[in-house]
Amino acid sequence: MNQALFLDQIKNTPYITKQNLGLILEKTGDNLNYWVKKLVNEGTFIVIKNGLYIPKYYFDIVSAANPQEKEAYLIYLANTIRQPSYVSLEYVLAKYNFLAESSFAITSITLKSTRSYTTDIGTFYYQHLKKELFYKYKIEAFRDKQIREASFAKALFDFLYLRSFDSQTEMRDYLLSTGRLNWDIVSKAQKSEFAEIIKTSQSQKMQSLLSILESVNIL
């Protein structure tokens, strides 16, 4: 294998599948497995999940560009690893300083089953949401690609919708005290969007949650 030619072929590739690697290397079966393992051990590729890899060269270049570029790349990977999906939940809420603690995983909503992937570049966590609620995400750009991330209001909806409460009292305590949620940072427009999402969802649980927040003039 001409390594210089090979590296030139993949240097602008944000990710690569094992199938595509086989085509580039002209390898199959155990021979392909050998070369994939070799390239991973040499540090040429980082394993994201079985059959999916990212070139370390590409990751290093993006990481060196600026923090925003790296974040956009990680969101792009999160969208790619489990499809369809969009970044949401704690990861988005933490960016707005709504939560008391930072998110150490890139959290997403998916139509598929709940799952997590732990990699050398971070943990990607996915929670299932039914199709009727799979919306209200922004489409932004990462280089010549698209990335999907929930608005703040939708991330908040997803976060509270998927959280279990044993009683109305527990829900109220979490919203107003124990959850340490920073309602002060939420804009009027975000509050309005959040309330509209709740009404559209027709979820009895979220309607109860809305009533609590309205009763104390948070919404």
Image: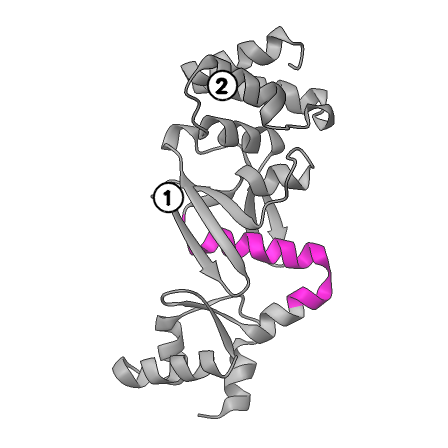
Q: Is residue 38 visible?
A: yes
The residue at the point 39 percent across, 73 percent down is 20
**Pick the front one: 16 or 87:** 87
Q: Indicate the quadrant containing the C terminus: top left, top right, bottom left or bottom right.
A: top right
The residue at the point 60 percent across, 40 percent down is 92
1 vs 2, front mark: 2
Q: Which mark is residue 34?
A: none
Magenta stretch, residue numbers: 62-83
| Residue 170 percent coordinates (x, y) | 49, 18
From the viewer's perspective, is residue 140 above or below residue 25? above
Q: Indicate the quadrant containing the N terminus: top left, top right, bottom left or bottom right.
A: bottom left
Label 2: state its secondary structure: helix
Mark 2 packing: few (<14 Cα in 10 Å), some, or many (20+)? few
Determine whether, in the image, residue 206 is placed left or right of residue 61: left
Indicate the amino acid at tag 2.
Glu
Question: Which corner quadrant of the image does residue 28 belong to?
Answer: bottom left
Which residue is disc 1 drawn over? 114
| Residue 5 percent coordinates (x, y) | 53, 88
From the viewer's perspective, is residue 185 above or below residue 95? above
**Pick the front one: 19 or 173:** 173
**Secondary structure that dominates the magenta span:** helix
**Pick the front one: 18 or 89:** 89
Which residue is disc 2 drawn over? 170
